Image (cartoon, rainbow, N blue to C red):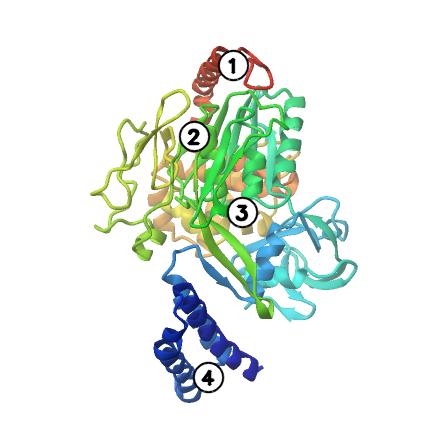
Amino acid sequence: MKQPWRNLALLLFAAAVVVGGLAGGNLLAIHADELAQVRLYTELVETAHANYAVADVTYRDLVYASIGGMLRNLDPHTSFLPPVAYDSMRERQQSSFYGLGIYVGTRNNRLTVISPIEGTPGYEKGIRAGDIIHLINGEPTEDMNPNEAIRKLKGPKGTDVTVTLLRPGLDEPLEVTVTRAEIPQETVRHVHMLTPETGFLWITDFSRSTGGEVARALAELKEQGMRRLILDLRFNGGGLLDQAIAVSDQFVPPGTTIVETRGRIDSSHQSYRSTGRHEPLGLPVVVLVNGGSASASEIVSGAIQDHDVGLVVGESTWGKGLVQTVYELSYGAGLALTTARYYTPAGRLIQRDYSSYWDYYTGYDANGESADEDGEESRPSEPLPSLDPREERPVFRTDLGREVYGGGGVTPDYIVEADEDPAVITRLRIQSGFHRFPFEQGVPDGVDSTDWQVPEDYLERFWKWIVEEDLVSAGELGEALEDPAVERHARMRLRYEIFNTAFGLTEGFRAERQLDNQLARALELLDEAEELLERRMEQDLRTRGGNRRSGFVAP
């Protein structure tokens, strides 16, 4: 493979020079000046390949590095995708894959089953939550990162994979051979009722199936009596533009703008409007966002906010307002190239400044201070500072005239920073203490209902165990327990781990959400969201004559 990669290195630079010369309309300049740069580049590649002393470098290494350097001069989201990354991206965008049907993660530095998915091959073979995946087809997993292990568990439909499991309480490993089957790749992970009238819907990312998943989830919640909705987009890094539009289409009035894209070429100028294919939800909505909400998540939350059909609560979103088109390249690689900016219905460009990559990726301003300076809830009444505190963010207006802000992401209507775990709880979570204890020491009798609470004696056993396991010293524990929050967090974390196994991921998730102060605030703000929606409906009725297909009507 050395010669092809060497040739690619030469062709890459030569093609860039020729295209640049053609664009400038001066082929003579290519031969006179730019070919000297081609020779310089090829000499650099040859010299580095032949003489670099610290490690062997291949032509591919050098080509990839040069591509990365070239693209970094464009923007943070234009990126080269090596074959493995390109395949992984395409797989994430699909609605299904072939595998075992288990959620896995790292616990205590070991690859561990978080939960099997009911009805899948892994579930039918008896794989349980808490099982440690020791071997995959005889290969140890200790040095594998989770993504690498997941790639090995996946494979063609109908093929077998053998996993060796270490199960707490058993002295001998379990060897299980599982036949891979089609596994739905769901992006709506949790759909349930929080209260008799309040539905909850969490979208983890935007793949090819997201729009349909949301439509089915909303129908399911309505059948259960939903009259209000919490839409959770926290830590949702985005995905496919068309799916962001498909989701937004289910919330905003028919015929209204969802998002506009504008780029350098005419074909990149597009306005995407609500089709009316779905009856608008027409119920009070609060959207939860944070700094991990980006791209497609910002399109959805921006459209809901700009059209006054819901409130946005949480922390300012990431601020990615650039649209990438993915091009397939030779050798199985890909290029995600920024081809346009996107704008919310009010005309906001929410892309953060990226003149400093350090500031962009760390969220710190030029003075080294966090962009979100105080932890108190606030309702912005004036333009908030961007990452450059010397600049003011531009002000825009929603359909009802409320102020919203461009640049720096989508600013919530109510800024509510997430409560942090007490330090000792964070430490125990990192050490997998809450996960290990129920599996190694057993679960108390009586866990037959989600009303179950952690008994006092069980909690006392836990405190004793973490000291015996040297996860926390007796002195540190005694000092930590002076804070009442420590005991409360410990009880909830233990319920989370126990419920995951006893009742499934949804009930475990419900237990953990009791520590979620942002969700608690969202529930409190649903009355205000209902008032906002009523104002929006009244405006629609006045301006559109109450036509059901052109606007909202009261539910």
Q: Quadrant of the C terminus?
A: top right
Which residue is the site of mark 1? 544
Which residue is the site of mark 4? 56
Q: Amino acid at mark 3?
A: Gly
Question: Nearest the camera: 15 or 213?
Answer: 15
Asked whether, in this view, residue 397 is left or right of residue 227, the answer is left
Distance Cα–Cα, label 4 vs label 1 = 70 Å
Asked whether, in this view, residue 33 is left or right of residue 450, the answer is left
Distance Cα–Cα, label 1 vs label 3 = 34 Å
Residue occupying image coordinates x 34% and y 77%: 33
Which residue is the site of mark 2? 312
Distance Cα–Cα, label 1 vs label 2 = 26 Å
Q: Position of residue 329 (x, y in %)?
A: 56, 65
Q: Is residue 481 above or below residue 339?
A: above
Q: Amino acid at mark 4?
A: Asp
Q: Nearer the viewer, mark 4 or mark 1?
A: 1
Question: Nearest the camera: 132 or 80?
Answer: 80
